[in-house]
Each structure stands twice: as structure tokens, then as C-alpha cells.
Amino acid sequence: MKVGIIGSGMVGSTAAYAMVIQGVGREIVLIDRDPARAKAEADDIAHATPFTNPTHVYAGDYPDLAGCHVVVVTAGVGQKPGESRLQLLERNAAIFREIVPRIVTHAPNAVLLVATNPVDVMTHLAARYAAASGVPTQHVLGSGTVLDTGRFQALLGRYLGVDPHHIHGYVLGEHGDSELIAWSTVRVGGLSLEEYGRKRQVMLDRAVRDEITHRVRDAAYSIIQGKGATYYGIGAGLAEIVNVVLDNRRSIITVCSPMAEIAGVPDVTVSLPHLVGGTGILATFPPVLSEEEQAQLHNSASIIRRAIDELDAKLEGQAQV
């Protein structure tokens, strides 16, 4: 199985390394606007294969995407000091307008996995540009809140003294400040939080939940303050999503993909539990939320919809000039 990665910065290269460590795929091609960077990262990762898994890792160009089953997109620019979110979106939209058609040209049947931030809006744009070349929307997905959900499971598992693999709960909505934890749906080994708390005499009052929510939501800020960027968590998350697609595992994960309607907001892209397999999104399972959580999801989806509308208006204005 062959995987392409567009962008050889810290996220793209870490994702490639995580795939090699986990044995995800057998061929990985790295593509970057700086070919020397792509080659250096590919060579360095390839030197790890004698100690990990037999994977062919190399640098290439867009024609080398031929035969890829998944193409991961991490390319994009960071926010400049004093730059607005809309200005950042404009610059990344210009990059996606160029690279998505090139990906589709050489790998028309590949699943596109977007990791570029702000990932909800960028996934929406990637699906739009891919659709112009006939790619079905369900073949385009973003990493969404996969990492946020992992952070939540890790923190709650630590608090409860339970292996995070046995905690089932989701972070929904925007991958960002308006995301929400669907506390009402959380299960621990099949038990509700209330049932588990009673059996184990563990307090899970509103203060504890608020603290965990805060730590999940602000995790990236804390990591960036300490070391400048986040890449290990998202790199492992991307490797996991790629593995789900390559193996057609039909896993339910909180990726994002364009939806006709979410929580009363039309034509928007935020994270929900999706069934993911070999062709991308197979089905969507909007959870039954509390009234408060439903309002939070509506707010989160509305924020992303406004960002898309603002960007569209800006791009339309530029086209008319």
C-alpha cells in the first residue's frame, strides 16, 4: 500500500515516521516545495527502517503520487504576527487551489486526508476543489478532533485509573476553541460515568469535568508555549487514520468532512463520529446530545460556517477586481 504526504515539515515528517514505526503502508513518498527538505526527511526516516518495518520511504514530486491509496496534506503556512485568521485562510486557500488539483490528477482514486490548520475550513476547501475534478466528497476528510479525542481519553483515563482504550467518548465540533466534549455520551467499559464513579468511588463533578475540558482544549497552547509546535500527537493520529483507510478497518473516529447540515447549520465541516474505511467516509453517527451540548455544537458549527462565508466573500471580491 502506497501513501503520499504533501508537506515535509514537522507534522508531515513525524506522520511518516509514525507510519514506519507502526508498519502502516509499505511505500511512502514525501513531497515538499523545498525538495531538499523532503529528501533529507525521507532519507532520515528511511535510515530507521532496518530497526522498525520494511518501508520504502523516498522524496518525489506530484507524478510520484500515482498509485497512492491515501494522500495526506500537511502543506500550508503559519500565522504571521499581526495576521488575522482570515488572512491566513486566504494564503492557505491559494496553496490548496494549486495543490489539490495536482494531487487529483496523479492520484484520482486516493483518499485525501487534510491536516493543515484551520483543519475544518481547509478540509471544506479541499473537498470543494477536489469535487471540481469529480472526486466524491466522502473521499476527502480532515484529521478533525481525532487528536483532541485522544487527549481527552488519555486525561480521563489517568483520572479514573483506566486504560484509555476502554474509554469511549468524543470531542466534537471545531478543532479549536469552540470544540466540545460530549460528556453525556461517555462510557467506561460500557458503564456511564455516573455508574463507574459510584462503583469506584470516584468524583466526577462539574469542577472536575471543567478542568479536563480546559486541559483538552488548551493542550496545544501549552505545548506550543513550551516547545514551539505540536507534532508527535497529530503525527500518530494521522498514522492511525491512514491505517484505518489502508486496512479498511471501518473504525468510528472523529474526523471532519463536509456535511449538508450539522446541528442546524447548513453545508459545514466540523468533527462528528464517522465510520471510516477504505474509501473514506462510509457513514456518520451524530450522537444524541444533551440540550446544552447540542447548543455548543450549533455554536461551533456556526463559527466555522462564518469563517467559510467570510473567506468566500473575500475570494469573490478578489475575482471581481
Image (cartoon, helix red, strand yellow):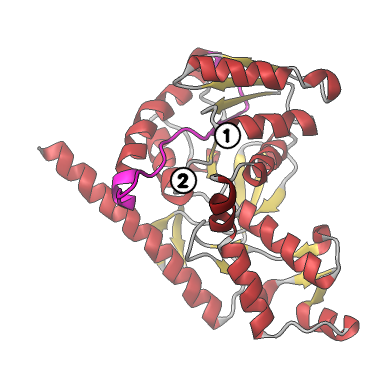
Q: Give the number of the disc on residue 35.
A: none
Tag nearer the camera, 2 or 1? 1
Residue 251 included in the magenta stretch of the image: no
Q: Quarter of the image for the N terminus: give it.
A: top right
Image height check: is 214 above or below 139?
below
Residue 78 included in the magenta stretch of the image: yes
Image height check: is 117 above or below 156?
above
Return the residue at label 2.
117
Tell me the amino acid under the disc marked 2.
Asn
Residue 315 image offset from top left, x and y in percent? 23, 42
Q: Residue at x 84, y 79 (%)?
A: 196
Judging from the image, what secondary structure is the residue with disc 2 in? loop
Q: Residue at x 51, y 35 (%)?
A: 74
> In this picture, which residue range is highlighted in magenta?
64-88
Q: Nearer the viewer, residue 136 or 23?
A: 23
Tell me the amino acid under the disc marked 1.
Met
Residue 274 image offset from top left, x and y in percent? 62, 54
The answer to whether the residue labelled 2 contacts the one labelled 1, judged by CB atoms less than 8 Å apart, is no
Judging from the image, what secondary structure is the residue with disc 1 in? helix
Residue 222 image offset from top left, x and y in percent? 57, 57
Return the residue at label 1.
10
Image height check: is 31 above or below 75?
above
Q: Nearer the viewer, residue 104 or 309?
A: 309
Q: Nearer the viewer, residue 50 or 72?
A: 50
Q: Quarter of the image for the C terminus: give it.
A: top left
| Left or right, 240 with reference to 9 | right
Say few, some or many: other residues with alpha carbon within 10 Å of mark 2 (under 14 / 14 to 19 / 20 or more): many
Image height check: is 234 above or below 223?
above
- Extreme left residue here? 321
The answer to whether any part of residue 66 appears in the image is no
